[in-house]
Amino acid sequence: MGKAICVSGSKGGIGKTTIAINLALSLNNKGKNVILVDANFTSPNIGIYLGHPVTPKSIHEVLSNKISLEEAMYIHKSGLKLIPGNISLSSLSNVNPSRLKNKISSLKKDYDFVIIDSAAGLGKESLSALESSDETLIVLNPELPSVTEALKSIRVSQELGKGIAGVVVNRKRDKYCMTIQEIESMLEFPIISVIPEDEIIKKAQAERDLVVNLYPNSGAAKGYEKLSSYLLGESYKEAKENTVWEVFKEVLGLK
């Protein structure tokens, strides 16, 4: 039986979807059988980010009892399996979020990890994603409003009996940000990965691909790799670049 992890954070625009898709691919690249599910029914973004903007067969149709889970599955060119959402407003009419839990349970029988991209806020959509998961991965930006909203997500997850997989700081910049120590003190949970603000993320989105796939040596990709390693209980070792000086030292027997 696999594990379902809900990528959550009640404040909108913090980068949950980007975290979810890159985490899913990183786990997939490490040999795990992974599927990514878009549970943001009102504003689904996974299909848009990964080149499936128009999806007549999606999680919306599954939760409307029109098609099976298997019919809604797509495979991205990176090899990542996903169940996107339908951006059509008409697709919302028959969606029943309460059905999501049983669908996720079914997926857990066949996959090591089911990564759920949750809606923002703490409404019916996001609660259905939390209730369907085993653990919650809390995503936030290093700003006080975002950290405050993350605290709400943690409390709600705990009330639902869900474990906290960890806290991820996304879009970390050098200036005008809360420190890691301040965030950990406020949330009373450790930060397990920090994803820097990186223009390469927007470039990957423009190419309908993932940072982990296109730019594995970027700061953002290394943050995602550290995150997946943590969730797998593995130590993360950053690959060192073989600069001219490093090669020279190796030739001289100095390393």
Image (cartoon, rainbow, N blue to C red):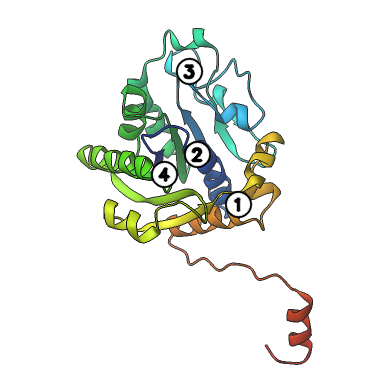
| Residue 178 drawn at (x, y percent) | 40, 53
Q: Nearer the viewer, mark 3 or mark 4?
A: 4
Residue at mark 4 to residue at mark 1: CA–CA distance: 22 Å
Cβ–Cβ under 8 Å for marks 2 and 1: no
Tell whether label 4 touches label 2 (CB within 8 Å).
Answer: yes
The tag earlier along the polypeptide, 4 or 1, is 1
Residue at (45% x, 19% y) in the render: 42
Quadrant of the image for the N terminus? top left
The residue that disc 3 covers is: 60
Q: Is residue 2 visible?
A: no
Between label 4 and label 1, give the one nearer the viewer. Answer: 4
Q: Nearer the viewer, mark 2 or mark 1?
A: 2
Quadrant for the C terminus, please: bottom right
Q: Amino acid at mark 2?
A: Gly
Callout 4 touching callout 1 (CB < 8 Å): no
Judge from the rendering whether residue 65 lies leftward or rightward of residue 88; answer left or right.
left
Mark 1 lies on a secondary structure that is helix
Relative depth, front residue between 223 and 164: 223
Crowding around mark 3 (Cα neighbors within 10 Å: few <14, some 14 to 19, many 20+) is many
Q: Which mark is residue 29?
A: 1
Residue bearing the label numbered 2:
15
Identify the residue position indicated by label 4 in the image.
Answer: 139
Give the mark, 3 or 4, whose residue is nearer the N terminus: 3
